[in-house]
Every structure is written in C-alpha cells, then in structure tokens.
Image: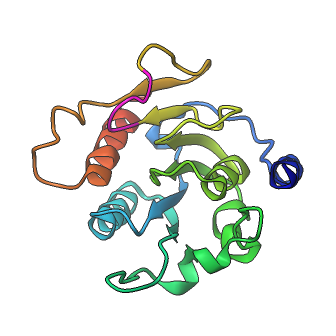
Amino acid sequence: MFKKIFRKRRLKKDRSDIATGLIPLKEIHSAAVLLDAAETGWAACAEKIKQFCKDSGIVLTMLFTDLRKPGKGVIMESDREQTIRRRDINWFGRPDLKKAALLTGKPVDLFLCLADNDSYCIEYLAKSAKARFKIGRRPFDGDPFDLIVAESLPDTDREPEGQEQTDGGAQERKNTEGSIVEEIFRTITDIITKIE
C-alpha cells in the first residue's frame, strides 16, 4: 500500500505533460529508446535501431534495463552507464533518476519502449519520457502510448481507449529469422514510414 502511494506521487510529479500523437517520419529528428538487455536479441535489435536512426537522420538516445538477479549463468553485457539494473531501483520501484534522465531529461520526437515488462520501473520511464510520439509493447493505466505493437495481444476483446493495438503480423513471422524484439522493431519501422 505504501509503495502504491509513493508510486502515484512520483508519477504525478514527473509525468510528462507534452501532448502526444502520431507523427510522420519526416518530423522525427530525435528519438529515445528503451530496450531490455535481458531479452534475447536485444544487441542485434540495438544495432538495427542505430542503423535506422542513422539512415533517417534521427539523433538517438538509448537506455537499457537488465533487472535480472546477478548470479550463476547471468551475464550482463550492456553498458553499465546506460543500463538500469536491480541495484538502480529504489524501494518502491523507481529507477535511479540520473540514469532515467537519459530518457526523461530532454524532449524528443519519438519514444520507443521495446521492453516487454510491466514493472513500475518501465511504467515510470514510459510516462515520464518527454516525447511527442510514444510507442510501446505493453499497455499501462493512463495510456502513455499512442501506439502499442506487441507479439500477441493479452486480451483481444478489449483495447484501451485511445490506443491502437496491433501485432503487425509478428505471430505469422514467429518462425522467421530474428528475435521477437527485432520483429517488433521491424513492424514499428513499417508503421512509422507509412504515417503521413
């Protein structure tokens, strides 16, 4: 109960007040991306994101999360300075503000949340990111995303109001080359390039 109170207060204080909506690729000059470094294929996806942004003339900022418990068989490969780890999460779930500022510190045109995680840490970053257009993989209360692109829909009978959900054919491409996160990113780039 105390955690919920502190979480609500912190989100009320830090939540972005920038109006969001779909914007075309030609209007996207800066992007902030959140990737889960514990997910299979994250490194290859990060390279594809960098290449896409370079080709499109988009200034990119990336932040990673790796909330796995360090131990036997767990190898953390992402850059420490750009990664929120378990020890960077405070008692009620908020990420370290210095690291979070990589995404929340300056306004950008596009925010991509490619982390397939519904933790408060991810919710905080998604809601606090100052972006004109937000895309994510999971819905949160308060609808922080303009578009949700997921591997599969958790509940196909209900769609959060004001949001469009699509699996972008990721189910059909499951057996093709590339990880799920790479497929999600490919679907997102397909959608972005079609927005006018």
Between 148 and 2, the one nearer to me in the picture: 2
Rendered position, 188 above or below 180: above
In the rendered image, residue 70, in percent from the top left (x then y), is placed at 47, 83
Is the magenta region chiefly helix, strand or loop?
Answer: loop
Locate residue 52 relative to residue 98 in the image: left or right: left
Q: Residue 11 placed where, x, y %? A: 81, 50
Tell me what residue is drawn at x 77 percent, y 69 percent.
91
**Residue 21, picture quadrant:** top right
Quadrant of residue 44 within the rendered picture: bottom left
- For residue 47, above or below residue 142: below
Q: Is residue 130 found left or right of 176 in the rendered image?
A: right
> Residue at the location (37% across, 65% down)?
50
Considering every residue shown, the one lying at the far left of the view is: 176
Q: Position of residue 154 (x, y in %)?
A: 43, 30
Q: Identify the residue at the far top of this view.
A: 157
Q: Is residue 114 above or below residue 152?
A: below
Q: Residue at x 17, y 41 (%)?
A: 174
Q: Is residue 45 magenta?
A: no
Q: Position of residue 196 (x, y in %)?
A: 44, 26
**Number of numbered labels in the structure image:** 0
Residue found 26% across the figure and 46% down from its top:
183
Which residue range is magenta in the image? 150-155
Q: Nearer the viewer, residue 84 or 17?
A: 84
